[in-house]
Image (cartoon, coloured by chain):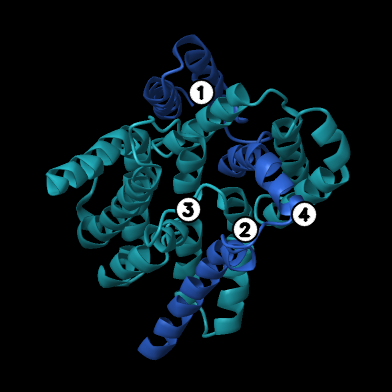
Amino acid sequence: MTFTQQVITILMVVVGTMATRFLPFLLFPAGKSTPKYIQYLGKVLPAAVFGLLVIYCLKDVSIFSGSHGLPELIAIVVVIALHCWKRQMMLSIAGGAVCYMLLVQLLF
Amino acid sequence: MQVAKTKTKYLRALKAAFPHTIPIFAGFWFLGLTYGIYMNASGFSFWYPMLMSLTIFAGSVEFVAVNMLLGSFNPLQALAMTLMLNARHLFYGISMLDKYKGTGWKKIYLIFGMCDESFSINYTANIPKDVDNGWFMFFVTLLNHFYWFSGATLGGIFGSFIHFNTEGLDFVMTAMFVVIYMEQWFKDKRHASALLGLGISLLCLIAFGADNFIIPAMIAILGVLTLLKKPMEKGGETE
């Protein structure tokens, strides 16, 4: 690939990314009233999307080979337990990550 | 007087925003360094990860872009692939229509920098009453952008010298999204949508595999939420 072709490829990725981010704001500008259906989606989508993001993070875990997803499962249980107990974001995240690192580096 | 007042406004927003971004600092530095090292190892100078992390600011796509740059020239395929991988941002935009309202010129940057992490924090954070919402979200986005940019650039420059055991550090991202999912759960009175999102995504992952499940999952979530509009509104899901 020549330098110009590389620049064009990178520009395509920039344009594609920006399109997905700006489109809703262009379709439903702040000045006009947003359709009821879109308002409804705006309210119920986030909870579902956070579920999608959790699964997205775990997409490469394989249950049937390697460590069978055990380190992930244990660390997530630690995150949930810590967060239910103290409800301090930093503690839950750091605790879960340290637990996971110990598990994959020492045990599995 | 006025100047001092504005200054404290910025500072207060920055101070409120920073703690929320610490896990992202850890995660982005890890992933950004990895990305920079990967580009370095693929034969690109540090200018590539530096400028790409600045202009694209969407982690997963940037990793894929390395392969695009190494393959044969196919701009339309690059565009189509990017649209597919980033389609989930459409959902973020729909959810942020209201929150980004009235943020003035900052809105353009807020939308530009709306990656998974910026969206998640800006959507769920309980912003203190005395802090300006627009500036809070602006600093969350700016800090995240800076972490990603600096990580990728440093990885590109020092890539070949870094040797320490960071295996598993990327789990900070997973942990963060689990916590954000829980925060949303505590906020909501009803949990149908949260459970649907988790369940449908898992089913689609099993059915379509790791590389192809996002688009079917998005369509299925959209479809089911649309079908359930009436019962969801009656059940208080939208309150």
User: How far, Cα to Cα, is label 2 from label 1?
Assistant: 30 Å
The answer to whether tags 3 and 1 share a subunit is no
**CB under 8 Å between callouts 2 and 4?**
no
- Label 3 SS: loop
- Label 2 SS: helix
- Label 4 SS: helix
Graded by Cα atoms within 10 Å as few (under 14), some (14 to 19) or many (20 or more), the crowding at tag 3 reads many
User: How far, Cα to Cα, is label 2 from label 4?
Assistant: 12 Å
Which residue matches tag 3? Answer: B115
The answer to whether tags 3 and 2 share a subunit is yes
The amino acid sitting under disc 4 is Ile
Q: Earlier in the sequence, mark 2 or mark 4?
A: 2
The amino acid sitting under disc 3 is Cys
Lateral position of residue B181 relative to residue B56, left or right: right
Q: How far from the left and from the top, in percent, is residue B203? A: 78, 41
Is residue B208 visible in the rendered image? The answer is: no
The amino acid sitting under disc 1 is Ala
Which residue matches tag 2? Answer: B90
User: How far, Cα to Cα, is label 3 from label 1?
Assistant: 25 Å
Q: How far from the left and from the top, in percent, is residue B146? A: 29, 53
| Chain under disc 4 | B
Closer to the camera: disc 2 or disc 1? 2
Graded by Cα atoms within 10 Å as few (under 14), some (14 to 19) or many (20 or more), the crowding at tag 2 reads some
